[in-house]
Every structure is written in structure tokens, then in C-alpha cells.
Image (cartoon, rainbow, N blue to C red):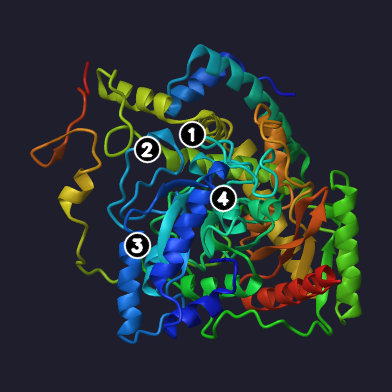
Amino acid sequence: MDLKRPIAALAAEVRAGKLTASDLVAASLARIAATDSFHTVLELNPQAAHDAEIVDARVAAGEDLPLAGIPFIAKDNFLTFDTHTTAASNILKPFRAPYEGPAILRLKAAGAILVAKANLDAFAHGSSTENSDFGPTKNPVDPTKVPGGSSGGSAAAVALGQACFAVGTDTGGSIRLPASYCGVVGLKPTYGLIPRTGVVAMGSSTDVIGPLTNSVADSALVLDVLAGRDASDATSIERDTEAYVATSGDLTGTRIGLIKEYLGAGLDTKIKDQIEAMVSQLEARGAKVEEVSLPATELALAAYYILVPAEVSSNLARYDGVRFGHSSAGATDLEETYRLSREEGFGAEAKRRIIIGTYVLSSGYYDAYYKRAQKVRTKLVGEFSAAFDKYDLLLGPTAPTVAFDLGSKSQDPLAMYLNDVMTVAVNLVGVPAISIPLGTVDNLPVGLQLIAPQRAERNLLAAASAVETIIGDWSAR
Amino acid sequence: MSNIGITEVERVAKLARIGLSPEEASRLSVELGQIVGFVEQLARVDVEGVAPTDQVTGLVDVWREDEVSPSLPREELLANAPAQQDGYIVVKRVLG
């Protein structure tokens, strides 16, 4: 059975009794097994078939479930019962979550079934999924390439049809970049729209949860289940009272700003050509597109790689070998327990970020690095705010290139960080953005990124849906 | 490019309570120099009079009612501890 069908249609068939949750979960598990060479998954949920039976019973009892019987995969930084939760790190290898957060609970309440936990760059630190302590995921289109990261397992799983959707996290592009490299839709919502309790923290001032899906309509449907404040996360915000839907909007009069800095040096010219072709199509449908300069976006990556490692070094301080996770057998006193457990349990990139973060926060450097980066962040927020006075949406590529060769950047951390150049600004400003498959370059997927003001997900999804329709018309020709 | 010496890397590692092999410290000294060299472009930005941004959605003073609510069972939380005894987490000696 093909799982790459509209989620709304599959759930409707389950509710109507034409399909069962058990059928869908069996199809999902079979597809995961048949495509396991891509290493998208770290662990299957041993209770998935049982959970499907429970959903079938709920449907039979007349419950109206928006995601009835829909199999999904969660990035392994989501705390989930019945499996380990490792964040793809050795230090959390033995960890079993004692609770589940609102995101997972809402999906399950809506009738979705967790089938597996997806691979990621350990602790979501990376752009290629090669930083997983358990081996990289391969690109679903070309297994010699990376899938992007850090939600690479989640994006590749959706592209391979292993489940109907996946949930990932995006701190600096970790949903949108793999969506772009794998050819799926990746949504990064407004900061706070989906409560993060029950997700392994990375950069707390930018971390968000979001869906990876085959279509914009699927993305909206999953967002509609996930969104809304929860008292357990004090940073979470109220959702819209209206449903998040992706009705393909009329673009007449829509003002779109094309981000000048994202079209400059470093952008593959073939990607640029595709973006420009899409701009012409949008104009032909009544949108008003202009180039807009956001000079601070060129500083965003530098600010990000101060602020986020600083937050990472703080969040990763909890892994101390005492309360949970790996504990060094060789330690003779408490200080050594900390030092050796962390030395043995953290991989190279986690160590790198802890060291950078501790360095920029340490006495004598704080003002020069951390505080200055926070001020640059203010400038960035101001530029986006001014742009959204003039434009309804901003548009650009998701990434400067298509997926690169496995291993080609793993020895050069700075080159790896540069993959995030077009995604990090959105996180620092807290606005929502979506990556939509635009086409292919050199037979590899290319993503188009649309960005909206905070809390404007409904406009973002409507425009994304219009873009998707244009692309559908293209490929039909 | 900035130069971050191995002694400086070791000082920071001590602050972060993380052990590094000599090879790791040596490699991090080079990589940290490259990364700090990259982020130092911010030193050229005029940020005079600009306030720092801590958070972006404008929430202030998020309170909850001061009420007792159920907490997770002690046994389930302790189940992840590497060593436990009589309902407590066991640690190595603290004083030398």
C-alpha cells in the first residue's frame, strides 16, 4: 500500500471503515523494512501494531479522529514511551523517557500511531545527519548524498513513504534543510506555537517543533493537531482559533519580497534560475514581487553560531552521568564522573559546540561575543519587521546548493555550518517558514522557502499551497 | 584567523566539566580558531544603543496558579539513574 497519499483522504477511509489503522501500520513497517539501507530509523516502536488495534477500536466506537490510523515517525529527540530516546547520542543511549510531551500526546490523541524513531545529527547539531553517533542517513534520491539535517532521518523517511508524516525540530534550519535535500515539505512554525515539553533541548531561544510531509495540505493538517499553548511550556503561545488549512489562495495583490542576499554569491545558478522562473509564475497569477535587501541576514549565521552554542553548552550541562544516561565506569570521584561521562558520551560536534558555547560565555568574552550577537539579533528582528510592513511574505531558496556527497564536509565544521546560511535568520527572528519542493537540479531536489510574519501560518500555508499548485502544473506538462 | 591555544581549550573544557584527549584538544584548538575567526565579523557591526534580544514573541511574566499537581512517580524517574540505593541516586565521593 502506498503511504504517499493525502493524509486527510487516508484518515477519512479509516473513519469510514474502508481501511484500518492496522493496515496502515503494517504497510508502514513493511516499507521501513524494505528501505532500511537508507538508515532513516534508529528504533521501531514495538507497540505500533498494538497501538493500531487501539485506534481501530476507538474508530469503531465512533470517535472522530483527524489523524485516524495515520502512521508517523518522530525524530529521536522526542521523548516517547515504548522506545529509547537517544537524540542519536551515545550519552543518551540507555535512556527511556518517563513522560511524553504535548506534541506526541496530541498526535496520539488525534489517532496517529508512532511507528519508529528517526535518525538525526546527535542532539540536532548538524546539517547532514552525519553527526549521528549511530551512523549517517542516506539521501532517498541518491544514497551517495546526505539527506540534510538535523532532521535527516525524518525527511528521508517521508520521502521514502515509510510513514505518512514525520515530526522534527528546527533550531537553525533542521526541518527546512533536509526537506529541501529530500524533496518533501518542511514547516518551521512561529516560535512557541507548538509546546516543546518532552523534546531534548538544544537552543532554547530558537528550538521549534514542526511537521515533514508530502504536501502542504498534510503539513497544515498536522500543524492543526500540534499547535496551541500548553502550561508545561511557558514559552508556548496561543494558536489561531480557526483551523490551519491549506486552501490554495488567490495570489492577486499578494506582496512578496524576494530576499536579495539569498540570491547572491554562493547560490547555485541553476537553483537561482528555478527561483526566478517561479517568481514569473507568481507574478502571472497576480502577486507583486520585488527584491528586498535584508543586510543583517549576512550576519545572521555568525550571530547564530554564538547564540546557539551558548545555549547548547547550557542545555547539555544536564548530561552529567549522575541522574540518567551514560555514566563512566572509570570515575573515582564526582568531578571525574562528570568529566569522563561527558568525554565518553558526547560526539565530536556536541563537544565542539559545548566548547564554543562555554568560551563565548566565559568571563571576559561575554560582552564581545554573546551580548554583541544578541544586539545583532535585534537588528535582524528590526529588518524583518520593516520588511513585513511592506510585504506579506518573503521568498528565497532554502539552501544554496543541492544535497552534497556523504563525507565531503564532515571534516570541516565551518563549511558544514555554511549550509544553514539561508535558514538561521528565520529562527533568530522567530517567524514561520516553509520549504516546498521546487524541482530538481542535477537530479537532486531543490527547495523554495517562503517566510511569513509571526503567527501568520494561515497565510503562509495558503501561499505555499498556491506555489505547490504551480509546481504541480509544471511537472504535469 | 584567530588563534585559540590548546591551554585555552583546556581551560574552557575544565569550565564545561568535559574531558578531552590530547588529540581532541589539539583539533579543537584549530577548529575553534576558525569558528571564532568567522563569528568575529560581528565586531565590525555598529551596535551602539541597540538593546540585546533574549526572546522574540514578547511574552512577559508567564505565571501559573500556585497549586499542587501530581508529579511523576519516583521509581520511574529513578529507573534511569546509573546507580541507586534505597530510593536515592548514588554518586562517587565528593571530597578527596
Q: Quick one: SS at disc 2?
A: loop
Among numbered discs 4 and 3, the one appearing first in the sequence: 3
In which quadrant will I find the C terminus of chain A?
bottom right
Point out residue A52 in the picture as x, y percentages from the top left corner: 35, 68
| Badge 3 or badge 1: first in the primary sequence | 3
- The image quadrant that residue A307 belongs to is top right
Q: Could you tell me how far apart the alpha carbons at marks 2 and 1 are, in whole angstroms?
A: 10 Å
Q: Amino acid at mark 1?
A: Asp
Please name which of the two marks, 3 or 1, marks the residue nearer to the observer. 3
Residue type at numbered disc 2: Lys
The reply to whether the C-beta atoms of the residues labelled 2 and 1 are less than 8 Å apart is yes
Residue A276 vertical position relative to residue A82 in the rendered view, above or below: below
Are dots 3 and 2 in contact, CB under 8 Å? no
The secondary structure type at the circle numbered 4 is loop
Total marks placed: 4
The disc at residue A93 is 2
Give the SS element for disc 1.
loop
Q: Nearer the viewer, mark 3 or mark 2?
A: 3
Residue at the disc numbered 1: A133
> Alpha carbon of mark 2 to alpha carbon of mark 4: how far?
18 Å
Co-location on one chain, circles 3 and 1: yes
Mark 3 → mark 2, Cα distance in angstroms: 24 Å
Of the image marks 2 and 4, the number of the one nearer the N terminus: 2
**Residue on which disc 3 sits:** A49
**Which amino acid, by three-letter code, is at mark 4?**
Ser
CB under 8 Å between discs 3 and 1: no
